[in-house]
Amino acid sequence: MSRAVRAALFGVTLVAYVNSFWLGLAQDSKVILSQDTRLTAATADNLALIFTRNYWWPLGGDGLYRPVTTLSLLFNYAVLGNGRDAAGYHVVNFLLHAINVWLLYEVAFLIFRRAGPAFFAAAIWAVHPIGTEAVTSVAGRADLLAAMSVLGGLLVYVRGRGRWTPLVLFAVAALGVFAKENAAILIGLMLLWDWSFRSKPRWREYAAVAASLALLAIVRSVVLGNLAPYSPIYVDNPLRLAGFWTARWTAIRLIGADLLVLLFPRTLVCDHSFAAIPLASWQDAPLWISLLAVVALPAYAIARRRADPVAFWAAGFFAIALLPTSNLILLIGAAFAERFLYLPTVAFAVMTASLIYRLKNQRLAKGLLIALLVVYSVRTIARNPAWDDDLALASADLPNSPRSFRLHYMLGRALFEQDALGNLDRAIAEQEAACLILAPLPPARSISFPATDLGRYYAVKASLVAPEHQSEWLEKSRAALLKAREISQALEAEYDGVQRAHGGLKARAGEQGLYLYLAETDIKLGNYAGAVEALRYAQGLNPRTLELYDGLGVAYAKLGNPAMAATSLLEKGLTDNFQATTVRSIRELYKQAPDRECAFTGSAGVFQLNVQGCRQVKGDLCTAYSELARAYRDARLPEGVQWAIREGRDRYGCAVR
C-alpha cells in the first residue's frame, strides 16, 4: 500500500471520527474505567489479576476472559496516564480502527487485484455508522482488537510462505481470541479464502490457529473454573427462554434487521434488551422477508461461486463473522447489538465496492461511491456525540426503541445524576416506565435496579414535599424497594442453583444498595426493626461496606438498645481499624448505656477502649467478632471468617464461631 493510499484512508477515517476525541464515557466504558482497579497501576499484582480473573472483575462471574483487552486499557490508564480521562482512550480506539482499515485495504487488494475497488471497500468500512459502537465507545476496544487479529491473521495466511508463518499466525490468532472470543472465526475465514479463490490449504497454518483456540479453551477452563459461574441475565436476551424454534426464528428476523441497518443506517440504537425485540411468530412479515434473504443470498453466492468468487467470499465472510453472535447456534448474553456488526460490515463494504465498480461507466461508479462515503460519514459524525455519556445516549436512542426497559432506566439514572432535584420528576417517570415494562415478568426473570432507583427517588421526593405528604412518598419508596428486594432475592436463589450445579456456592448475587436504601426509608418511617433486618442482610452481601454499620447504630439506638448500637459500631471499627470518627461515635453511644460507663479511658480528646477494666466491652467485642464472622460466612468470604475467628481469639480470647 502506497503512502498516498494510506494517508487517504487515514484522512477519510479521521473525518468521520475526529469529533469523537472529546467525548466522555457511556455505558460499559464508564463502569469498566471506574470499577476495575487492575487498571490503576502497571504492577505485577495487577498483571496477575488480569490473567487470573474474568473480564468484568471485580463484578461477578460473566463468562468472559479477555486479558489482552484489559491490558490495552491498562496501557491507557497507567502507562499513558489517561486515568479516567476519556480522550486518550478515544484516540487509541480511533488508531486501532485506522489500522484495521489499512488491513482491510490489503485484503481487498488481494481480492480485486485493483487499487480502486480495494480503496473504496476499505473507505466504506472506515466510515460506516455501524462502527460507532465499536470505535466511539471505549468498551468497543475488544471488537477492534479482535478485528485486527482476524484481518491481520488472514493476511499472514494468504501472503506468508516462510517457515515462521505458522508461529506468527499462532501469535496473531492468540492475541485475538484473548482479546475477544469471536476472533476464533479466523480459522473459518482461512478455509473460506481457500474455497473462494481455489487456493491449496496449508495445514500447518490451520494447525497453528487451532492451537491458539486450544490454548484459549485450556486457560479459560482453568481461570473461569476457579471463579463463580456465569448466569445469563434473562432481560438482556429473552431468546434464552423463548423455546428453540421461537428463538431461532427471531434470530433469523434479526439477521434481516442487520442487513437493513447496513444498507440504511439511519436509526441506530445502543440497547435491544427486554422488551425492545418482540419474539417472532409465523404471522410476522419481516420474518419471511428475512428468511428469504437468509436463504436466497447464500444460495445465489454458492451457485455463482466460480463465476463470481468475490460475491461468494463476501457472503461467506458475512455469515462466518455474524454466526458467533447471531443466536442461531448458541444463545449468547445479548439478542442484538450494533457492535456485533463491526466485522460483518467488512463483507458489506467489499460487496458494495464490487457491485458498483461493475458499472461500465467508471466515472459514475466512483461518483456513487464518493456520494456513499459522504452520506455514511455525515451519519457517523452525527452519531458520535450520542456516545458522550449515558444521558446523551439514552436521549438519542429512546425515541427509536421506546420498549427497551434499559433505555428508560439509563435515562432516569442519568437525569438524576445530572441534577437530582431539578430532574427528579423526569427521573421518576423514566424509572416508572422501566418498571412498567418489566412488570409482566416473574421476579426470577426480571432485574431489580429500576425498582431500586425508583424507591430511592421516591425517598428524595419525600424530603421535598410538605410534611403531611412525606409519609405517602416514603410508603411508595418502601413499596418499590420491597419489589426490588423480591426480585433480587429471586435472582439470588436462581444464581445459587446455577452455582450448586457447578460444584458449590462461591459468591453472592444480591444488590446491596437496595437494602441500604430500604433501611434508610424504614428508619424514616419508624420501622427500626425492619431497618436492622435489611442492614444485616446487606452486611451478608458485603461486610466491608462501612455505611451499613452507621445505619445499624442508628436503628439499634432508636430501638432503645444503645449497647447493641455501640456493638454495631465496634464491627465498623474492626473493619476500618478504628478510625477517629468511628471511635467518637462508639463513645457517644456507650454514654447512653449506664452499665458501660467504664467503656473508655483517656483524656484531652484521646480515648481508647477499656478492654481490661470493663468486661462489658470485651463481651461487646466478642459479639462484634461473632457478627462479622457470620456476615463473612453469609458473604461466602472464608478468608474473612478466618480473620474474625483468629483475631477474636488471639486478641481478646473470644470463642468466635
Image (tube, rainbow, N blue to C red):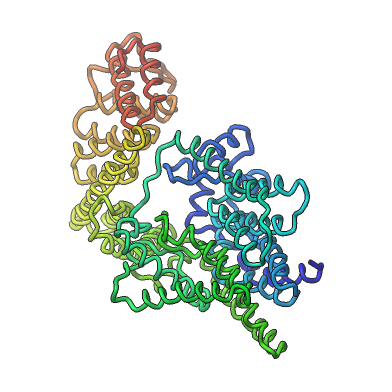
Looking at the rendering, which quadrant does residue 11 occupy? Answer: bottom right
Q: Residue at the location (39% across, 36% down)? A: 545
Up the image or down, 403 lies above or below 362; here it is above
Q: Is residue 285 left or right of residue 261?
A: left
Q: Quadrant of the C terminus?
A: top left
Q: Position of residue 445 (x, y in %)?
A: 28, 53
Q: Position of residue 615 (x, y in %)?
A: 29, 11
Q: Quadrant of the N terminus?
A: bottom right
Q: Position of residue 594 (x, y in %)?
A: 23, 19
Up the image or down, 307 lies above or below 139; here it is below
Count of numbered circles on the image: 0
Look at the image and tell me whether residue 367 can be seen: yes
Q: Position of residue 157 (x, y in %)?
A: 69, 55
Looking at the rendering, which quadrant does residue 622 occupy? Answer: top left
Look at the image and tell me whether residue 463 can be seen: no
Q: Residue furthest right?
A: 3
Question: Viewer-proximal residue, 2 or 315?
Answer: 315
Q: Residue at the location (37% across, 33% down)? A: 506
Question: Viewer-proximal residue, 432 or 422?
Answer: 432
Q: Residue at the location (67% across, 82% down)? A: 357
Up the image or down, 14 lies above or below 565; here it is below
Looking at the rendering, which quadrant does residue 446 occupy? Answer: bottom left
Question: Viewer-proximal residue, 271 or 204?
Answer: 204
Q: Residue at the location (52% across, 54% down)? A: 29
